[in-house]
Amino acid sequence: MIKTSLNPSGDGSGAMTDPFGRTISYLRVSITDRCDFRCVYCMSEDMTFLPRADLLTLEELDRLCSAFIAKGVRKLRLTGGEPLVRRNMMSLVRSLSRHLTTGALNELTLTTNGSQLERFAAELADCGVRRINVSLDTLDPAKFRAITRWGDLDKVLAGIAAARAAGLAVKINAVALKNSNEDEIPALMEWAHGLGMGLTLIEVMPLGEIGEGRIDQYVPLSLVRARLAKQYTLTDLADDTGGPARYVAVGETGGKLGFITPMTHNFCESCNRVRITCTGTLHTCLGHEDASDLRKPLRASADDQLLGEAIDRAIGLKPKGHDFIIDRRHDRPSVSRHMSVTGG
């Protein structure tokens, strides 16, 4: 068990509100920028990752997350890179689960590519994790290999099966890719819904240099939805899981389909989340180059006064929204950092 000096009350008395009146209750934390895949829309094949010495320790990540929980965060998602490749990361999950026990935290979850899930699913459930997101863009083994460059589809499917057997609710996340997997979306949806799993589709986002132009990958989800509506009965839902997705019920499958549309329809008006990188940098907006260093105040004092003040300053600068652009004139990253650094 990781030990930390912080003992948050969890009463929400220090709730964080940004300049536009949005309450920040959702924290996404990248615990590593490393990944065992090299997905074509996420990173280049020849990636240079951060030196391990630059990463916050697991104890520091625990203290940082706990400080946010003390300030009103109720949902905590661990991301990467691939979070399950970080050594001893389950000790962090187990330690953070104490906030579930006290009631200070409503949900502890993670997003994973599923490659290590068969190994860790039972322990995640034992730590109080109740649902996870698994990134999976295709059910075709050859295409899966092409998209992930290094991935093994059978390993991911075994991980999903292990998660379901452990009692975890699984939601599949799929990035819609032009001329790649867009024709598979109906089959992917029917497969997920047939196993009682939700599916959320995501538009390609212009984050980081990946060695090819995103204009050749991008397909607007408005087009995808219009195609699906010709084959399925889609009914808008008011569901809110604390994230950016908008959901529909699919009449023919009985399942739920989500759309995350940072390009065609941004979701900034209801944004309740911030992101922390594995180096302790806080980003209050996925689509801006804003950055606040929390590592320095974290390490400057044994108590959390300086850290709390730094968090408050950063939240006070959260922008109103982002303006991602992908077109022939802007076929370059809107933001220079890769998604694996930002944390999903």
Image (tube, rainbow, N blue to C red):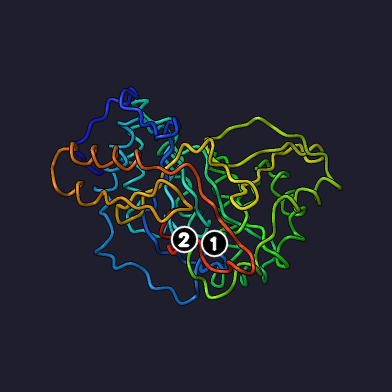
The residue at the point 32 percent across, 31 percent down is 71
Q: CA distance from mark 1 to mark 2?
A: 7 Å
Q: Choose between 220 and 97: the one closer to the eye.
A: 220
According to the picture, the residue beneath numbered tag 1 turns out to be 206
State the residue at coordinates (32%, 46%).
92
- Tell me the kind of residue under disc 2: Val
Q: Are marks 1 and 2 in contact (CB under 8 Å)?
A: yes
How many marks the image carries: the answer is 2
* Res 233 quadrant in image: top right
Residue density around tag 2, few if under 14, some if 14–19, many if 20 or more, within 10 Å: some
Residue 105: percent from left, percent from top: 39, 31
Q: Is residue 161 left or right of residue 310?
A: right
Residue 141, image x, y percentages: 67, 68
SS category of the residue bearing label 2: loop
Q: Which amino acid type is shown beneath numbered disc 1?
A: Pro
Q: Which residue is mark 2?
A: 335
Q: Residue furthest front?
A: 329
In front of the other: 328 or 232 = 328
Q: Position of residue 251 (x, y in %)?
A: 80, 36
Q: Position of residue 321 (x, y in %)?
A: 50, 45
